[in-house]
């Protein structure tokens, strides 16, 4: 009897350490953090701390900074993920056939993934610096810039700086996961398709893409959520500037909390971001379910 | 795209050119980092945008290693990342094993909790975590960072470990259990040795993530004695923002351990993901 009970409890012994840790360090603080959204909470101000209901959310409706950051979040996330995915897929397809020194090439093209986020931000900020970086001069030479200036200080162009760093840094993630998915497609499927006279393009569309679709859906979803939350490149490269032109929601939250010390309002913006991301993730899961259910 | 070898020489040349472009794009920023770190100060502005300076020097590395606190930051980061790598991999392999081998009540909830923990902006929990850890003496402490980083990295590490376990046939431990071993003994003696590449890949992944983390290191630890490399480097950048040579030398040094780690483990990452996580 005891033995069956022990057997029933066994999976919980294995999961308990992770679960307890995640609950204590992430979930409980998340609930606390969300509760700040309904309080007037300014750090170092002993008079703050009152319950204010939905005041912060009403404030948000009239806050230009919030709307700019929301628009930028969409651009930042969509452009970054689309470019990371496209280049990642091309790279995975290139790596998925035998060629000399494949191991070495693979290690080198995946290397940016190992570079710490803040460091890739700094590196790209330096590349865009006209004094020690080549990019402004190249862009000028190509006729894309009228003068070799730093795009990070131009409000209209500045967001492209962190996006470039993000694309460089994120290609390996997609390449690695898509390469793994490609390698788990049995070879005989291709051979059968080739015997039936399907050319490479047709095989890609009819065999590769459908078999990759579940991986694509899950990795794009995870990456979108992750990139939308990823403030580090922006904080390091532009601090959200010039004049808040490159602020995305997560960097805006950072600025609100740690420069204006307004934790209440920062938490309210974070709550909105979390809701938007959950809605997005749910939509993708429903879509994926519908796609895989189809005969 | 087919897996058969390219037929024509033209296709092979195109394939090689495209790969060369990817390699160049991946390496160029790192090459530039290295180049500026080796450029002597007097040539920094005159030859700032040349592909290679007319003279190189190791002076910037010398002054970073001798006259700055980077050796201390380096040591702190090494301690925090190694401890986080070990602890998170241990917790995650237990959880990943349970996900892979058991059906149990509440499993969907456990997986759901781990997914949600990856979805929200971590900025929102900085203040609550600070208030949680301060009374325990875990702010301004390397231990505090290890605890926080272990929690952050366990969910993804658990999914990664699950996929490595999926690749190992269940018959193996069932056979051992038929011979009288308990499941835990079978796990320790039969399964874990087979997952060593997976454990290494997961540990390396977590190590890299802990090595790179900036926000919590900045917010929880204000004293330089317990600063990690990212916080130290950012402090250096905002203080001496024109000393490019030293900043980039420090950047190259920050890159060495994770770069080396990654070159060794990257193929196991592809293998592990091939094995299971992507089955959907």
Image (spheres, coloured by chain):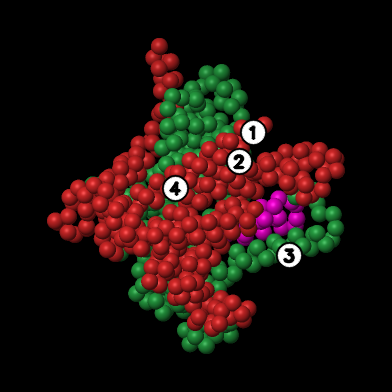
Name the image quarter holding the N terminus of chain A: top left
Chain rendered red: A
Magenta span: A90-112
In this rendering, the answer to whether B63 lies above or below A10 is below
Question: Which of the numbered marks, if any, corresponds to residue A294?
Answer: 1
Chain rendered green: B
| Neighbourhood count class around disc 4 (C-alpha, 10 Å): few under 14, some 14–19, many 20 upward | many
Point 67% across, 59% down: residue: A105
- Which structural element holds mark 3? helix
Question: Which of the numbered marks, if any, corresponds to residue A214?
Answer: 2
Badge 1 and badge 2 in a common chain? yes
Q: Please report, as a chain letter, where disc 4 is located.
A: A
The answer to whether residue A257 is seen in the rendering is yes
Magenta: main secondary structure equals: helix
In this rendering, the answer to whether A285 lies above or below A226 is above
Question: Which of the numbered marks, if any, corresponds to residue B17?
Answer: 3
Name the image quarter holding the C terminus of chain A: top right
Q: Earlier in the sequence, mark 4 or mark 2?
A: 2
How far across and down, in percent of the image, does residue B270 sit? 61, 47
Report the front residue among B121 and A54. Answer: A54
In this rendering, the answer to whether A153 lies above or below A107 is below
Q: Please report, as a chain letter, where disc 2 is located.
A: A
Magenta stretch holds residue A94: yes
Q: Determine which residue is flagged by label 4.
A: A277
């Amino acid at each position: 009897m005891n033995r069956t009970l022990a057997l029933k409890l066994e999976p919980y012994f294995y999961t308990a350490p992770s679960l307890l840790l995640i609950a204590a360090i992430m979930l409980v603080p998340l609930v606390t953090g969300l509760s700040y959204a309904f309080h007037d909470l300014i750090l170092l101000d002993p008079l703050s701390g009152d319950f204010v209901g939905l005041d912060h959310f009403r404030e948000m409706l009239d806050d230009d900074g919030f709307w700019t950051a929301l628009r930028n979040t969409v651009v930042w996330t969509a452009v970054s993920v689309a470019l990371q995915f496209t280049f990642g897929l091309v790279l995975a397809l290139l790596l998925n056939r035998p060629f000399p020194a494949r191991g070495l090439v693979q290690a080198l093209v995946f290397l940016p993934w190992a570079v710490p986020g803040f460091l890739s931000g700094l590196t790209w900020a330096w590349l865009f610096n006209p004094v020690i970086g080549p990019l402004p001069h190249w862009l000028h030479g190509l006729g894309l810039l009228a003068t070799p200036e730093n795009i990070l200080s131009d409000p209209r162009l500045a967001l492209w700086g962190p996006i470039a760093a993000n694309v460089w840094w994120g290609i390996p993630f997609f390449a690695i996961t898509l390469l793994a998915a490609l390698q788990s497609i049995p070879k005989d499927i291709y051979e059968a398709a080739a015997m039936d006279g399907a050319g490479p393009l047709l095989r890609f569309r009819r065999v590769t893409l459908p078999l990759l679709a579940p991986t694509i859906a899950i990795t794009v979803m995870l990456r979108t959520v992750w990139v939308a939350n990823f403030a580090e490149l922006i904080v390091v490269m532009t601090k959200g500037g010039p004049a808040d032109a490159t602020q995305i929601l997560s960097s805006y939250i950072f600025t609100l909390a740690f420069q204006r010390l307004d934790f209440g309002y920062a938490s309210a913006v974070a709550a909105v971001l979390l809701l938007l991301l959950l809605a997005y993730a749910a939509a993708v899961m429903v879509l994926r379910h519908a796609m895989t259910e189809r005969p | 795209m087919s897996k058969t070898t390219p037929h024509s020489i033209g296709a092979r040349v195109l394939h090689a050119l495209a790969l060369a472009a990817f390699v160049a794009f991946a390496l160029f920023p790192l090459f530039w980092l290295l180049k500026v770190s080796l450029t002597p100060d007097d040539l920094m502005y005159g030859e700032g945008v040349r592909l290679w300076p007319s003279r190189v020097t190791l002076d910037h590395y010398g002054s970073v290693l001798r006259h700055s606190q980077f050796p201390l930051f380096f040591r702190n980061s090494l301690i925090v990342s190694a401890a986080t790598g070990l602890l998170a991999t241990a917790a995650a392999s237990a959880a990943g094993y349970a996900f892979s081998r058991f059906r149990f009540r509440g499993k969907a909830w456990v997986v759901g909790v781990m997914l949600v923990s990856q979805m929200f902006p971590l900025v929102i929990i900085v203040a609550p975590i600070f208030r949680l850890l301060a009374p325990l003496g875990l702010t301004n402490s390397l231990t505090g960072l290890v605890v926080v980083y272990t929690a952050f990295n366990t969910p993804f590490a658990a999914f990664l470990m699950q996929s490595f376990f999926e690749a190992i046939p269940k018959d193996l431990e069932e056979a051992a259990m038929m011979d009288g071993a308990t499941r835990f003994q079978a796990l320790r003696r039969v399964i874990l040795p087979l997952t060593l590449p997976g454990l290494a890949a997961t540990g390396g992944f977590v190590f890299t993530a802990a090595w790179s983390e900036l926000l919590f290191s900045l917010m929880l630890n204000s004293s330089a004695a317990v600063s990690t490399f990212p916080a130290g480097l950012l402090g250096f950048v905002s203080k001496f923002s024109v000393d490019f040579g030293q900043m980039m030398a420090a950047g190259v040094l920050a890159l060495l351990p994770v770069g080396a780690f990654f070159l060794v483990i990257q193929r196991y990452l592809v293998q592990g993901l091939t094995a299971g996580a992507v089955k959907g």
